[in-house]
Amino acid sequence: MFNLTQTRLQYTWVVVTVLLITVLIYNTLHRSIKFDADILNLLDIGDNAGLLTKVASEPFQNKALLLIQHSDQQQAKTYLRQIQSAIAELNVSEQISFNPRDNLDIRALVATYSDYPLAFLNNDGQTARDNNDYSFIISRYMQMLSQPSNPLVSLSINKAPLLNLADWFSAQLHSNQWKKDDKLLYIEQQGQRYYPLFIELKSSAIQLDQVVSTVTLIEQVLQQHQPTPAITIIKSGLLFHSAAVTQRAQFEMQLFSVISLIGVLLLTLISFRSLRPLLGIVLLISASMLAGMAALVMIFAKIHLLSLVFAISLIGIAVDYGYHILFAAKYTGKSGAELTKHITPALLMGAGTTLLSYLLLLLLPIPLLQQVAVFVGAGLLFAIFTGLTVITSWSAKNVTVSPSIKQPRATNKVFSLLLGVMLVCSIVAVTKWHFEDNINIFNSTPQTLIDDEIKVSKLVGNLQYPRFISVSGKDQQQVLQRFEKVRHTLKTLSNSEYELRGIDQWLPSIDTQQANEQWLMGGIKDGQLNPIVSLISNDSVNKLLITPTAWMTVDKLPTFIQQLYPAFIEHTDETVGILSYMGPLDEQLYSQLQSQLEFEINYYDKPAQYSAALSKLRHYILYFLAMAVVALLLLMTLRYGWSAGLKLGMFPLLTAFSALAVTLLISGYVTIFNLLACILILALNVDYVVFLKEHGRVNYVLKSILLSAATSALAFGMMVFSNTPAIWQFGLTVLLGVSLGWLLCYFMPSTLLTQKEVQV
C-alpha cells in the first residue's frame, strides 16, 4: 500500500514539475519576468522617501556625458564628431548632441509661450519689476531689436512685440558656463579645453539585461577612433556605473558558481563513488530552484535581484537534505518506501523549523524579504517533496555499509574549550559592536569611474546622484510659488554656482505671471514704455491690453520640457514638487534656508536615502531573527522536551552569533548581509542538530553533516574572494558559521544526545 502511495506521489511530482516549467517558459516567452535592482523600490516602509527619490532620479537615469580633452584642439574636435556619428549608428540612443539646447524645438516653444506675451520676465526683468524700473525693459528691447537674425526675435515679435519673451528665452537657453568653438561647446580649466558629448539613451538600452552590451558598444567606438597620443575621455552617467558593477558581479558569480559546482560535484562523487547520487543532488537543487523561481514569477510583478542573492541560500539547505537521504540509504541499506519512512521525521523536523523561520518574513512589511520568504518557502517544500518521493527511490542500488556507532574522538574538555572560545569571541565582539548601514561601503564601482564623476562635478556641476529638495502644497500653483521662494532664498544665502533645477525655470507660478503682466500692461497704459509702443502697431498694442483669461500651466508645457524635470506627485492629499540641487547642501545652509521660509522643505541625498533604507531593513531583519529564534526554541522544546530542546536549540544560536562576532572582529563592523547569512547558518545548523538527535552518532549522520558543511563552505566560502563588499561579507559569515557548526557537532558529547538504536 505504501509503495502504491509513493508511486502516485512520484506521478504527482512529475505533473507539478511540468507545470512549474510551463509557467517559467510561458512568462519568458511573453517577456513578463521583470527584474529590479533599486533597493528603494522594494522598501515600502510607509513614507514617500523612496517614491520621491525615484521620481527625482528619473530625468537623469538615461543621460550620459562624455568630456573630450586633447592637447591638439583640432584633433579633439575631429574625434568628437567621429564618435558622435558612430554612437548614433549604434541604435542605443534617443538623442546625441554637442549641445542639448540644439534638441529643443524652438519654434514649438515660442508658439506655446507666445499665447502669454506679457507673462514672462527673466530674473533681471523681475528685479526691474520689483524696482519699477521700466528703463530696463526699454534697454533690453533695443538690444534684442538690433538682432534681427536671432530666431527668438523673429519668431516671437508678432505676438510678443515687447520682446520680453525673446529676452526670457535667451536667458533660458544661454549658459555662462559653456563657451563656443566652431559651433561646439567647451569648458576650460587650467588651460585645457573639454568638449562635451551629451547622450540620451533609449530606455531599453539601460535595462539590467542590456546595459553591459550597450556600454561595450560605446567603449568599442571610443577605442576605434582613438588617435595617437590618446584622447582623454571623462565619463559620467548611471549606465557606466551599472554596467561596471553588473559585469563584475556577473563575472564573479559565474566564476564562483562554476568552481563551487565543480567542487560540490567532485565531493559528492568521491563520497558516493557513483553517478546516481550525483544526479540525485543535481535534481534536488534544480527542483528547489525551479519551484522558488516559479513562485516568485506567479506572485510578484517584479523580482528584485537582491532577493535572488539572499534566496540562493536555498541551495545549501536543499543539498543538506539530499546528503542525509543518500547517506541514510548507503549506510542502512534501506530504499524506497522503507527509506522514506525512516528518514521522514528528521527531514520534516529540520525542514519545518527552517520553513517556519523563513515564512515569518512574510509578516514584515518589506517586499524584498517577502520575496525571499516566497522563494525559499516554495523551494524548500518542493525539495522535501522531491527528496521523499524521487531521491529515496533512486538510492536502491547503493552498497550497504555497517552503521557502526561513531564514538567521539575528543573528550568533553575539547568541546568545552570550543564553546569557551566561541563565548569569549562573542563577548569581546559585543564590546565593539557596530552596525554599518552606509551605502558607500557597498559601492563596488571601479575607482576610475568614481574619479571621473568627481572631475565632471568640478568641471560642469553635473552630478550622477543629484540631491533634491521636496516642497509640498495644496496644489501645483502653491508648490510653484514655494519653488520661487526657495530659489530666491537660496540665492540670497549662498553664492554657490551649483544649479537648482526645477520646472519653475520654465513655468513661473500664475501669481508671478499675473504680476509680470500687470506691471508691463501698466507701463503701456501709463506711457512708461512709449519708446517701445511708438514702434509697435496700434493693433498689436490693443491685443497686449486685452486682459488674459488663461495662464501657462503644467499641462500646456511641451512634453520635451516636462521630461527635463521631476514630475509633481500627489501624496496624502497634497501636491509634492521636486527641485534638483547639483551640489551639497550642508546642515548649516539647510537650517538657514528652512529658518527663512514659512513652509517646511525636505532635503534628500540619494546615497543617504539608501543608507537610511538599509538601516530600516536591518531593523526588520533583526525582528525576523528574533521571531525565528523563538520559533526554533518552541519547536525544539515541543519535539524533545524543555531541557533537551533548549540545550539543542542553543547550539545553532551560539554558532550564528559567534560567526557574526568573528566577522565583526575581522572587518570591524557588521551589515545586513552578515545578518542574512545568519539565517542560512541557523537553517543549516538546525538540520545538523536534528539529524544527530533523531538518528544518533552513526556514520551516515556524521558523514552527511561533514559533506553538507564542506559543500556549503565551498559554495559560499568562495564569496570571500569577491570584490563586491556585500558578497564577500555574506560569504565570510556563512563560511565561519558552517565551520563552527560542524566542529560543534563533531565534538558534541554523547550525553547531550539520546541515541537511538540503529535499525538495519
Image: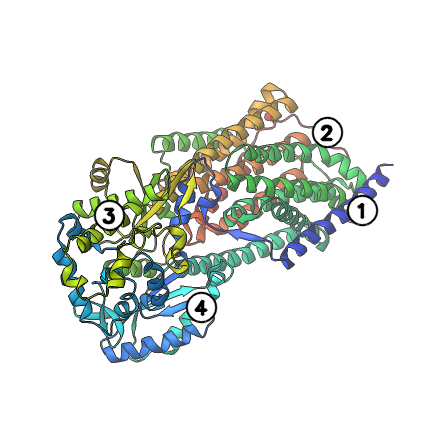
The three-letter amino acid code for the residue at tag 1 is Tyr
Q: Is there CB contact under 8 Å for labels 2 and 4?
A: no
Image quadrant occupied by the C terminus? top right
Chain-order first, disc 1 or disc 3: 1
Instruction: Give the Cα separation between the discs numbered 2 and 3.
Output: 95 Å
Residue holding disc 4: 216
Quick one: label 4, few (<14), some, or many (20+) residues within 10 Å? few
Instruction: Give the Cα separation between the discs numbered 2 and 4.
Output: 64 Å
Q: Is residue 100 left or right of residue 256?
A: left
| Residue depicted at 58% across the width and 45% down the height | 300
x then y, percent, for residue 429: 38, 33
Chain-order first, disc 1 or disc 4: 1
Residue holding disc 3: 515
Residue 309 tag number? none
Please tell me whether mark 1 or mark 2 is closer to you in this view.
Answer: 1
Chain-order first, disc 1 or disc 2: 1
Please tell me whether mark 2 or mark 4 is closer to you in this view.
Answer: 4
Residue holding disc 2: 757
Quick one: label 1, few (<14), some, or many (20+) residues within 10 Å? few
Chain-order first, disc 2 or disc 4: 4
Residue holding disc 1: 11
Please tell me whether mark 2 or mark 3 is closer to you in this view.
Answer: 3
x then y, percent, for residue 525: 19, 53
- Report which quarter residue 319 is drawn in: top right
- Report which quarter residue 219 is drawn in: bottom left
The three-letter amino acid code for the residue at tag 3 is Ala
